Image (tube, grey):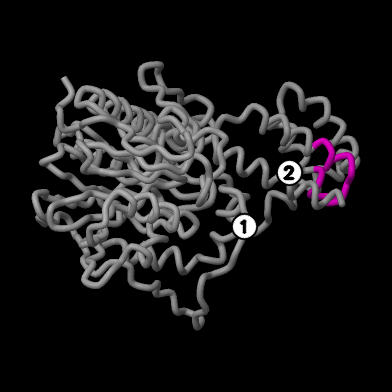
Amino acid sequence: MRSAIIGTLAAVVLNGAALAQAQPPFGGAQQPTVAGAGQTQALSFAGGRIHQATGFSNTFLVTTKAGDVVIDTSSPFNVARHRALLGAISKGPVRDIILTHAHGDHTGGVAAWKGPGTHVIGQANEVEFNNYQTRLAGFFAGRNAAQFGGPGRGPDFNRNPGDYAAPKLADVLVEKDYRFKLGDLTFDCFAAPGETPDMLNVWIPELKAVFVGDNYYASFPNLYTLRGTEPRWALDYVNSLNRVLALKPEIVLPSHGVPIVGAENVQRTLTQYRDAILYVHDAVVAGMNDGKDVYTLMREIKLPRALQVGESYGNLVWSIRGIYEGYAGWYDRDPASMYATAPADSDAELARLAGGAEPIAARASALVATQPALALRLTSAALATDPKNHAALMVRRRALEALLAASRNSNESGWLRAGLAQTDAALK
């Protein structure tokens, strides 16, 4: 039976949105929820002690008898709305801000929440992870815009060449474990690497509640994200989820989507999630040791029915390649790969041998209805030899539209829309 401490779900719901209409658990075709959008709302859990402002990413407010704790602060686009929603629930001072990790959609509101004497707590790897993001700010700008929708932008502030130090976020850095008491609640912060190396989870034993950041969302995880990332180690996810499961929580609060409520539901959901990750990891490792190439494994490995957790955000095929290349790197044993000759260069030569872009575009057109991904690949070859070829661009557009219509993955959809925009620009 669910503990009485879990309490009722929706204490505050704004704009007439029912709980069932809240942002789906990080997936689907939805674009990020921004400040003032109709689905931005506040929900309360754990007997009214935990409050969640929903959005593309969540902000949590935990109330104690000695002040409040904020866990994650959402993005700069949502912080004003989240601040207003949660500020209407509690007027207490914010004593601590805990960051589950240093992605911008979790740290963008720190300045808005931080008051005199507020401590900001993060995992120790946050420093280097934030430097890494800063170092590649220009690289990520356009990719983030493509994946999530919206304009690209450059680095947030100017630096001298070689100066990659990011502004400091946390004044309390946690190596492994950090516990503090505030009022009547205990906050156990522990390192839980997974989606990022600086992931920090938070356990409140009095409420049997754990905040897991981005180590869980209702989709197979992004073991590789198309916008680019350092390796995300599958076994880190597994170990971190095992630690959460060992706590036997009654509510799990991810930083995207809605919580998992009820002890049995938590154990069932997180065990399935962990086992799905481990199954894919072990299948990739077995295939590598059998000498199979990455494309073979991308085609062959499938989750058994009992472990199918959905692919509305993360994707099995991308994750298989992420695990493979995370372990082995990019070299595919083809000597041609050792050199700086790009695949597009050989595509262009093959296209010329085939008679140019027109016959390749015609073949791609014949394949769009049944094999749109192959048709798309053929248009890349055609355009390698003639980037403005109208027939190839029109077929490419049809292939992208067919793939977009079939897509149920938000990241895939974002990149397909970006491809359509690029194709439309070339057609002008």
- Magenta residues, start to end: 382-395
Residue 92 as seen in the image, left or right of residue 382: left
Q: Is residue 396 magenta?
A: no
Task: Choose between 30 and 134: the one closer to the eye.
Answer: 30
Q: Position of residue 118 (x, y in %)?
A: 23, 67
Q: Which mark is residue 339?
A: 1
Q: Quadrant of the N terminus?
A: top left
Badge 2 is on which residue?
A: 420
> How far across and down, in percent of the image, does residue 150 sit?
62, 53
Near-viewer residue (151 or 112):
112
Residue 38, visible in the rendered structure: yes
- At 50% from the left and 65% from the top, the residue drawn is 136
- Residue situated furthest top in the rendering: 305
Q: Quadrant of residue 55?
A: top left
How many discs mark residues in the rendered view? 2
Position of 124 relative to 241 (above/below): below
Q: As displayed, is residue 421 above or below residue 119? A: above
* Quadrant in the rendering for residue 151: bottom right
